Image (spheres, helix red, strand yellow):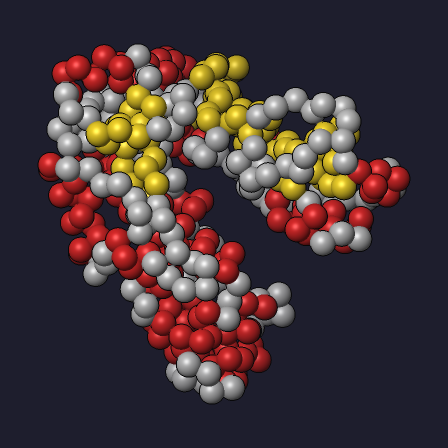
Amino acid sequence: MNWLTEDLPGIGGVYKQIPQDFQVEEIPLYPCSGEGEHLYLWIEKSGITTRNLLTQLARGLRLKERDLGYAGLKDARALTRQMISIPFNKLAQVKNLNLNQAEILDINRHTNKLRLGHLAGNHFTITLRETDTEPLPRSSAIFAQLQQRGVPNLFGEQRYGVLGNSAQLGLLLAQKNFVTFCREFIGDPQVIRNPGWKKAAEYYRQGEEQQAIDSLPKRMRDERQLLQMLIDGKSHHAAVFSLSRNLLRLFLSAAQSSFFDQLLMQRLPDLDQLRDGDIAIKHINRACFRVKDVEKEQPRVNRFEISPSAPLYGSKVMLATGKTGQSEMDFLEKSGLTLNSWKLPHGLTMTGERRPLRVPLTEPKIIVSGDHFITLSFTLPKGSYATSVLRELIKENQQIS
């Protein structure tokens, strides 16, 4: 296993033992104007997902979930603060709203509905427990190097679903392997903990579809829908495409993320070094360009103006050349895919884009530390994950001589 800071020993430790150990606060992309047809609710939640929060708001305010706006999804196992927008005409109902495991801290007004991605970044305050003795010196050294060289822009495990198979589902969808997709979607009994779901998965693998649907927990509507289609004699192809486009796009996105993470791992620990054939990204506007002169462009990398990139595969994504480009093509070919494999019906085509291999770490601060714990804070741009910072700090399974 490689790290960007592989020359610095980690501190060990665990996180998310309680929600307060992992705090996330959105950094808005723009201030509220104080006028307009939308209310912006600044909400603190703990122990629930953003989607659970949206469901509560929609029911309590008698709205459809599509009437709500949000900038990003936040983890359930955390204390988070984020903005949600609703129509201004619901102001009176908001004052009488009772939310479970969430609280409205502030209300403002703005001219437009909040959209996904409308945030500058996220600020994290995280406590690591059960660390090695005196974690402060090691943490300070790792923070200093990450601030200078950047944070690996990994997606990480939170991208891959409860069973860790979202990327595999996306790959099967791109491969048009619908029979295996259905099997994987219902789940592997060996890794499922819920008794009813586990039994349903066992029945399905035995070809007992009706017993499978009877065993599923009631909340598993997507799995139930797919099984019912098969019971009704529909093809596996039809059953798969009966699922919501949002869900299927989530799987395809997870497959893109998995490929990206693997390509990034190949480049560690040298994410701040350009190579011949690279495609660089400008951090100021996300514009991409082919690197023609590594020696000329490397000083811009050192100043954090640009970074090397890897693809989120899609039908129109630009690929690198040279050894870097060959590695990018090898990942597709080994999976039985081409760029055209990402052209799918029903509005599911993924066009792809380039993603920087590293992102800047700003405002790193160690708040308090003891013999076997440390609390630290930092800021990352939108679309990047705190787990990438924690991975460098903890260095799980490291071998230190």
Q: Position of residue 299 (x, y in %)?
A: 23, 12
Q: Quadrant of residue 147?
A: top left
Q: Residue sitting at 76 percent across and 24 percent down?
A: 34
Q: Position of residue 213 (x, y in %)?
A: 54, 78
* Residue 142 visible in the current orientation: no
Camera-side residue: 12 or 384?
A: 384
* Residue 117 visible in the current orientation: yes
Q: Quadrant of residue 106?
A: top right
The residue most toward the bottom is: 233
Q: Residue sitting at 53 percent across and 36 percent down?
A: 117
Q: Quadrant of the C terminus?
A: top left
Camera-side residue: 219 or 59?
A: 59
Camera-side residue: 310 or 11?
A: 310
Q: Position of residue 303 (x, y in %)?
A: 30, 12
- Residue 38 falls left or right of residue 253: right
Q: Quadrant of the N terminus?
A: top left
Number of marks in picture: 0
Q: Residue sitting at 38 percent across and 28 percent down?
A: 286
Q: Is residue 265 above or below residue 316?
A: above
Q: Is residue 80 above or below residue 297?
A: below
Q: Position of residue 101 (x, y in %)?
A: 71, 42
- Residue 376 falls left or right of residue 61: left
Q: Residue sitting at 57 percent across and 80 percent down?
A: 214
